[in-house]
Image (spheres, rainbow, N blue to C red):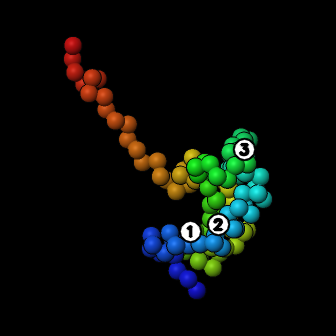
Amino acid sequence: MKEYKTKEQKLKFYKSKEWKQLRLKILERDNYECQECKRNGLVYTDNHNPDKHKRLDVDHLKEIENFPELALDIDNCEVKCVKCHNKKHNRFKFKKKNNKWNDEKW
């Protein structure tokens, strides 16, 4: 069984022909709509254009590093917008930059 622990292993997987084909099937199945937004009563779509720059991701529900056997399982994947996908993986760790003008007294 393949492993997807390192960045290189994951990159190779996500560039593979098998993943690219499955990704398109999942986008079509989910009607190019973020399923997380949909569950929350919203609609996010990229107007059925898979060539736009990554507005929609295909997310593994069970992560491939922990469940490599599910890496190409269509039932383990769903479409998410970049915002929902980043939220799931806690990728919003940006701090607001202080404006130097706010600290000065006039």
Q: Residues within 10 Å of mark 2 (few under 14, many from 20)?
A: few
User: Can you give x and y, in whole percent of width and height, for residue 38 in the image?
Assistant: 73, 46
**Mark 2 in CB contact with mark 1 (< 8 angstroms):** yes
User: Can you give x and y, in whole percent of width and height, for residue 67 in the image?
Assistant: 59, 75
User: Can you give x and y, in whole percent of width and height, for residue 86 in the image?
Assistant: 53, 52
Q: Residues within 10 Å of mark 1 (few under 14, many from 20)?
A: few
Q: Residue at x 50, y 69 (%)?
A: 11
Q: In which quarter of the image is residue 74?
A: bottom right
Which residue is label 1 attached to? 15
Q: Marks 2 and 3, Cα distance to the nearest angstrom?
A: 19 Å
Residue 84 is at least partly visible in this image: no
Which residue is label 3 attached to? 47
Nearer-N-terminus badge (2/3) = 2
Check the image and report above or below for 31 versus 44. below
Check the image and report above or below for 99 versus 77. above
Residue flagged by tag 3: what amino acid is it? Asn
Which residue is label 2 attached to? 20
Q: In which quarter of the image is residue 24?
A: bottom right
Q: Which residue is drawn at 70% across and 73% down?
A: 73
Nearer-N-terminus badge (2/1) = 1
**Mark 2 in CB contact with mark 3 (< 8 angstroms):** no
